[in-house]
Image (cartoon, rainbow, N blue to C red):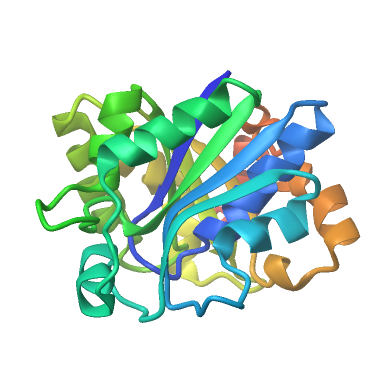
């Protein structure tokens, strides 16, 4: 059994597609997988959320939402404005633990970054991770500015005695600029954790069959894939 918290340095960095890729690689290994989205914001009641999108891309996973709020805001703010109940970290932890009892892998996808507030007490996804004793997978953008945000998130994890299992670039461009190419070497140092994958830009737009066949090639063996960090970095190293 493994519970992994999938968080990001910000919103829009590719957490859902990375979640789907990890789920797909796990399924390919014969493991059972659940995807838990504690708070889905910015989606109406009849629209598919992030957990459903991960399931669409990855295959037969159990997709669970705990709460849904219509406005695209931080969960605590969205809950307050909608008049709906917020989601507390103990509820997230309880739901994840129940899923872990009947699945090999449970992927808990956060909203926005690690310290986004989920309730009126200021609780965050990090609080749920602490209750669970779960490790975190950090999804980051490829380009300029990502080193600082990765370092800050990693520092926040360490200050809470939480382990960062690794870093995945959520959207690797077809034609990376100098900053993105240099970040391949610099991200592990900034985050204090290994680089475990790079998902190509536009991967979420692939047909599900194509996504599932390609996903292991985007992720390192620690995540069930065959991606080689050293080989990938050597391909893009400036001056190589």
Q: Where 46 falls versus 64 (above or below)?
A: below
Quadrant location of the N terminus?
A: top right
* Residue 133 in the image: above or below residue 143: above
Residue 78 placement (x, y as % from top left)? 28, 73
What residue lies at 47% left-to-right and 62% top-to-bottom? 142
Q: Going 80% across and 49% down the picture, which residue do you hit?
A: 59
Judging depth in this view, the residue of 80 and 124 nearest the camera is 80
Whether residue 2 is situated above or below residue 106 in the rendered picture = above
Q: Is residue 194 visible?
A: no
Residue 62, located in which quarter of the rendered image?
Answer: top right
* Residue 145, x across and y down, in percent: 30, 66
The residue positioned 73% from the left and 30% from the top of the image is 32
Q: Nearer the viewer, residue 4 or 81?
A: 81
Q: Quadrant of residue 157?
A: top left
Toward the left, the furthest residue is 121
> What is the x, y in percent for residue 104?
65, 23
Residue 139 lies, in percent from the top left, at 45, 52
Q: Is residue 165 left or right of residue 30?
A: left
Q: Is residue 102 left or right of residue 111?
A: right
Specify whether residue 145 is in view.
yes
């Amino acid at each position: 059994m493994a519970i992994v918290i999938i968080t990001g340095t910000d919103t829009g960095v590719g957490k859902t597609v990375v979640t789907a890729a990890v789920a797909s690689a796990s399924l390919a290994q014969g493991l059972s997988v659940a995807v838990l989205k504690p708070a889905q914001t910015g989606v109406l009641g009849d629209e598919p959320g992030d957990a459903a999108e991960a399931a669409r891309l990855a295959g037969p996973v159990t997709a669970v939402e705990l709460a849904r709020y219509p406005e695209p805001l931080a969960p605590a703010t969205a809950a307050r404005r909608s008049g709906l109940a917020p989601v507390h970290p103990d509820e997230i932890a309880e739901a994840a633990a129940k899923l872990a009892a009947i699945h090999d892998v449970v992927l808990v996808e956060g909203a926005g970054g690690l310290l986004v507030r989920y309730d009126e007490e200021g609780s965050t996804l990090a609080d749920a991770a602490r209750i669970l004793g779960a490790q975190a997978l950090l999804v980051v953008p490829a380009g300029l500015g990502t080193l600082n945000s990765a370092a800050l998130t990693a520092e926040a994890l360490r200050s809470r005695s939480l382990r960062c299992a690794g870093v995945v670039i959520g959207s690797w461009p077809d034609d990376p600029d100098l900053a993105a190419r240099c970040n391949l070497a610099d991200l592990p140092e900034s985050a204090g954790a290994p680089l475990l994958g790079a998902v190509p830009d536009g991967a979420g737009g692939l047909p599900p069959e194509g996504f599932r066949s390609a996903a292991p090639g985007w992720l390192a063996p620690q995540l069930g894939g065959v991606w080689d960090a050293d080989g990938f970095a050597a391909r893009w190293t400036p001056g190589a």
